[in-house]
Amino acid sequence: MSTKIGVITFPGSLDDRDALRAVGLAGAEPVSLWHADANLRGVDAVILPGGFSYGDYLRAGAIARFAPVMEPLMRAAAEGMPVLGICNGFQILCEAHLLPGALIRNQHMHFRTRDLWLRVENHRTAWTSSYEPGQEIQVVLKSGEGRYVADARTLDELEAEGRVVFRYLGENPNGSQRDIAGVCNAAGNVVGLMPHPEHAVEALTGPSTDGLGVFTSVLAHLARVSSGTSTATAGAASR
Amino acid sequence: MTQQITLDSVEHAAATPEVVQPYAELGLREEEYLNIREILGRRPTQSELAMYSIMWSEHCSYKSSKVHLRQFAQKQPPSDRLLAGIGENAGVVRVSDTLAVTFKIESHNHPSFVEPHQGAATGVGGIVRDILAMGARPIAVMDPLRFGAPDHPDTRRVVTGVVAGISQYGNSLGLPNIGGEVVFDPCYQGNPLVNALCVGVLPVERLQRKAAAGVGNVVVLLGAKTGRDGIGGVSVLASATFDETSQQRRPSVQVGDPFTEKLLIEACLELYEANLVVGIQDLGGAGLTCALSETAAAAGTGMRIYLERVPLREPSMEPHEILASESQERMLLIVEPDKLETVLEVARKWGVLATALGEVTDTGRLVITWHGQTVVDVPPSSLADDGPVYNRPLQRPSDLALLEADRAETLPRPTTPEELRATVLRMAASPNLADKTWVTEQYDHYVMGNTVLAQPEDAGMLRLEDSGLGIALSCDGNGRYTRLDPYNGARLALAEAYRNVAVTGATPVAVTNCLNFGDPEDPAVMWQFAEAVRGLADGCAELGIPVTGGNVSFYNQTGSVAIHPTPIVGVLGVIDDVRTRVPMGFAESTDGHVVFLLGRTQLELSGGEWAWVTHGHLGGKPPAVDLAHERRLATLLSQARTRRLLSAAHDLSEGGLAQALTESTLRRGVGVRVSVPADLDAFTFLFSESTGRVLVSVPEERVAEFTALCDQHEVPHTRIGVVDASSGALTVEGQFTIPLDELRRAYSGTLPALFSGTTT
Amino acid sequence: MARVVVDVMLKPEILDPQGEAIVNALPRLGVTGVSSVRVGKRIEIEFDGEPDLDQAREIADKLLANPVIEDFTVRVEQEESVQP
Amino acid sequence: MARVVVDVMLKPEILDPQGEAIVNALPRLGVTGVSSVRVGKRIEIEFDGEPDLDQAREIADKLLANPVIEDFTVRVEQEESVQP
Ligand SMILES: Nc1ncnc2c1ncn2[C@@H]1O[C@H](COP(=O)(O)OP(=O)(O)O)[C@@H](O)[C@H]1O
Ligand SMILES: [Mg+2]
């Protein structure tokens, strides 16, 4: 039986089909989930895709957080199901307090689309295990509210526990604190990042194919879980 | 709030023929007003007068342009690809046995001066609905823009607002922006041009029509509530000259809600898929008035509308306001009664309002009631099709002879290597040639995951199918060329868009256009218009590709001064395998490839960027255009692409070869070494704007095959140098070397210096 | 310390998509009985010396509000403590 | 008619680039003497019946403000006429 990875479509989700495509390219079965669903249709992992759910009105992710599908998602996340938030999905996960911190307007105040490099700071999460420690990957950033902020204590904690998963290399594109591009929860199963790995899965349409590793990682992780050899969910703390 | 005492019903109008009506204030001429009275056999009601004033405005009726636009159909070359053409919301072109593509450009110029952000945003929203109305999923946008002088104090407001508006609306819709134009010229100071192109794709059998066919079918309004947005906007904003008095009138601008539009798109596509609509029409500038009258007129039916059913944002709105409202994000559907419930369900699923407003009748009349009283009773075709048509007087502008005589070829030119080097840098840093990343990185070009090429490439390219089938699109225009010679200016714009598509390896197949001109009642402007249309129609016939649709924007002027006539031409190309597309830039991996210049170079500087940047000069005759050559060139490029002979191809346009080399080297930071051919001087080689030229790179071992192909297609080719990755520089042998870092500083610093450090 | 507060709201006839989105979301929070929500900007201006209302008004008119679609009010406010 | 107004401001320790941009733009308008500008949101809530402060506070806490980055205040306001 193939691994099923769900992608939630909220009203205003835009990169949902791209995430589904990436899941398929990685070798999993892509499953569309709908914001008004009351369950997760038996998927093994969930992606919250990029876009402008509810127009990004009020604050990005603020309204989507109350979608019906978020209830089963929160429960599943607490039980260790791998959850990935990309861009708007990251914003939703922060608003839902599944991840710490917040994403606010870029310091330069413009929407910015850029190919850029990230360093994989933690390769032991459910979504990064295919990468080498410290691997540098080229992906796409495209967002107007991508500046990661949290109070100093939270930031220190994230650093200490190895929960900064991705960091921007080179010029900080949006003013994110400590160049943070992505973080995870304490268990390492919930990861959020602003850049779009799903737009770096085909040489024809992206700057690289480096992003594919995110999707193959979760497959490897799920295989380990089902064969009972999982160590990865605890990985966050052991950097 | 006072109770409204008399509703101006049809009955009331018939009983009060003597009432004086403000037709002139609504932009109608006396004879037009009398014509309306004749059609109705009485005076129009307030609502009817509003409707006629809207539908008979220049914007909706094309009353000044119609007699000229006919040429597009008359001169149209035969095409077995065209599924819908002029007269539909947008032209539709078959690209495979099963797929069709629809595309169109529209303008939103005046609103974008009044409120740049919302004006530009709603411009994108409007053209997207046109594409949606054809049954297509919108898949990309482009944005040809014109602004005033870069250093004028008001330019920053307009540039930052327009770009932010396009960015916000397009990005929130999830439509990749794959190209456009940014041009500065003082002639656009009080009248920027904001044109927006949208392209969509559909299965051939899903093509939708706007006809309200089928007596008894239900008329459904889908989308946002109706408010007092842009009431009179079409007649005031889009058809009147912008001056101080209209500033005081502070017309209520339309505000866009891209989130609602996104839901509207998904809802419509679901309705099409389930075959739930008989007809569909977007609500654009002329709101319900246009949608009701056009759908009814197209089917030759009548319609019965209960206007009080329209969901309102402001309950106090009156019938004529509801009919004229330009509220965004609305579509009109014609639905069979037994499918209504399913339609409403789909709308609910997507969270968009859907309201049955009335039904299709066989009366041949559009009858609209308001709480039981009839406020409109007219033949729909009198609104949609029988508007006035004018054959306006034409006169060659009196200054044109003098302008033509003042040739740029006589201006003093740089000659020493140092002067030439400095000129390359100065040109690269000039606002029209400089890097546009400051603008384009505010746009998402990745979303949807099918963007194969996007700005700064010559054309945008999208994958349509996993088979590799794709399309390429470019839009171009040059107001200065067109000012000097409108006939050839239009052909030059066409040639450039065509060539930009061809360099990617795609085959150009169809044309759309947006004609931005001044006041049509000025015979000199009207002459420019007539010449440009003639040029474009002739040009399309010469190239063998049809005009499928477009848009006319008149009254682009400040006071008595018109903008440069600015036809923007969009060309659509098809490519069988996007994996074989040819990029514009040199690459690390193409080190040592041989660089050729295709086409012939002559001393042609008039209307060009060099004359403007270094001398502030505009005069003479624009470069010669040879469309037969362009056709051969395109065929050559397509065949060379199929045989994988090209590692890069880049069109030469404004700024000539120097600029093309700048762009091809900086694209990936890979240098080049060229030398001046024996029969040319270095200046002409670098800065002439002769058209029909392309810079290509070819692997050394394929050179013989390539030159043979050029000879076969009679395309002149000159070997000018090699890609030189290790040099990290642009070198013209015997003249100068510019390290790429230095070149990039010049090229990329300009726009951020002008517009960064922003507004709220 | 005193500061000047400028409130900028969309004109009543202008569509406020943010407000609409919030109203539509409220039922999911179990809130009913809200008929409308409008979202505007609140801008707090601190002056080096005494707060200058006239100058604040000028800043608001020229920079903070877009008179085509927005109205604004300007007032001096004593700093209050925030009550979450 | 009464409405509830919720003011939402970024916490003082969070950098507000919009405010900074305004401060930097002021000299161009000939304005000096402004030491700081902060930009937040003003949200006006109309209830069907009597304004309900408690409910408004709950809406603000759950939805209108993000406690990680923002503070808010809630108050009932009499409708005032706008003074441009
Ligand atoms: N410059 C033009 N060239 C070709 N067709 C045009 C041109 N201008 C307008 N048209 C055609 O006239 C019809 C009406 O145009 P328009 O009023 O802009 O459409 P819409 O009502 O969808 O906005 C369309 O089919 C359009 O393609
Ligand atoms: Mg239309």
Image: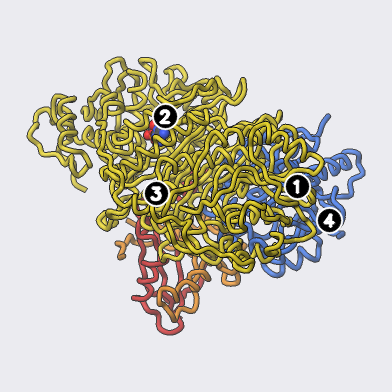
Chain colours: A blue, B yellow, C red, D orange
- Dot 1 or dot 3, earlier in sequence: 3
Q: Position of residue B753 (x, y in %)?
A: 55, 67
Which residue lies most toward the left here? B18
Q: Position of residue A120 (x, y in %)?
A: 80, 56
| Circle 3 residue | B483
- Dot 1 or dot 2, earlier in sequence: 2
Horizontally, is B583 left or right of B14 in the view? right
Mark 4 Cα-neighbour bin, 10 Å: few <14, some 14–19, many ≥20: some
Type of amino acid under label 3: Arg
Residue under mark 3: which chain is it in?
B
Of residue C60 and residue B660, the one placed in the foreground of this image is B660
Residue at horizontal 71%, vertical 60%? B733
Q: Is residue A151 above or below residue A32?
A: below
Mark 2 close to ligand 1, CB under 8 Å: yes
Quadrant position of the N terminus of chain A in the picture: top right
Q: Which mark is residue A135?
A: 4
Type of amino acid under label 1: Val
